[in-house]
Image: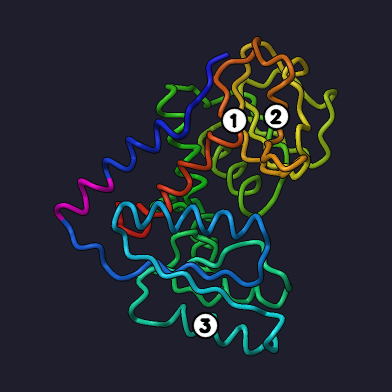
Amino acid sequence: MKLFNGNEHAKLLEAKITKHLEKNDSKGSLAIVQIGDNPESSKYVTIKEKVAKRLEVPVRIVRIDHTKMQSLEVVVRGSDVIYSPSNSSVIIQLPLPKRRFYSLLTKIPYEKDVDMLSEGAKRKFYTGDFSRVSPVIRSIEYFIESNKLKIEAKNILIVGFGALVGKPISFYLEKQGAKVRITENYSPDKVGSESLIVLSSDVPNLVKGEDLPEGCNVIDFGSSVLNGKTVGNLDMNSDTSRLGIVSPSPGGMGPLVVRFLLMNHLGI
């Protein structure tokens, strides 16, 4: 098994960002809107803010306490951030505490949408327009290209079919010629002869290495807190020795997603 070190690859992406900023203006601010105080959301917002500031990318964090406002007030406040001319890019940190707040995603103009979650961005993506893609898709592209993997006509299993990871990745890989299967209720008997498995479930340590095909590559997007420790879907304490290239969680795709978010903001 070969471990994919996302932190090391993130350094290479940071070098590209730094080189770009040496020659180009940083544009306006990247605004990150967090509604509520979900611990996982707070952690990811802090990471994004820290990386942006270290690379001298202007970032604005807007935290909204929805418990002290009416739902409409929250939406109006979020809309003000979205439409502010000083913010050239905007993301709404997910998940959101109320379904109504998801309407904010529809308000983000395509040119400001660096997470590619607005209606315009999704419409373009699901018609096969990959001229601009989400940080998640860019991360999986990077993994495939940097490891020189062949995916055309290869069997790929996607575990989880969420709007952020499973659904867009399955569509993208199918368009690249892969033979994609999807399961939302994983069990070892659902594994076939896959050469790549993408994990995006909310169940910690769901998959054991010994249940996967020999030489199978694994990309783990899962993230859960178990006994105070962040773990992914792949149980790294299981027998992973027979696997191919493994992008673990944490430390695999996460660092890449943050850097590609900044690169989308800067237009790199």
Residue at point 76% right, 28% down? Answer: 207
Residue type, numbered disc 1: Pro
Q: State how many labels appear.
A: 3
Q: Quick one: label 2 or label 3, which is nearer the N terminus?
A: 3
| Chain part drawn in magenta | 17-23
* Residue occupied by mark 1: 248
Q: Is residue 192 above or below residue 198?
A: above
In magenta segment, residue 21: yes
Q: Quick one: label 1 or label 3, which is nearer the N terminus?
A: 3
Q: Is residue 261 above or below residue 146?
A: below
Q: Is residue 75 above or below residue 47?
A: below
**Labelled pair 1, 3 in contact (Cβ < 8 Å):** no
Residue type, numbered disc 3: Ser
Residue 120 shown left or right of residue 162 in the figure: left
Residue 23 spot, x, y in % from top left: 14, 53
Residues at marks 2 and 3, CA–CA distance in whole angstroms: 38 Å
Residues at marks 1 and 2, CA–CA distance in whole angstroms: 7 Å
Q: Secondary structure at mark 3?
A: helix
Q: Secondary structure at mark 1?
A: loop
Residue 105 spot, x, y in % from top left: 57, 71
Q: On residue 234, which mark appears?
A: 2
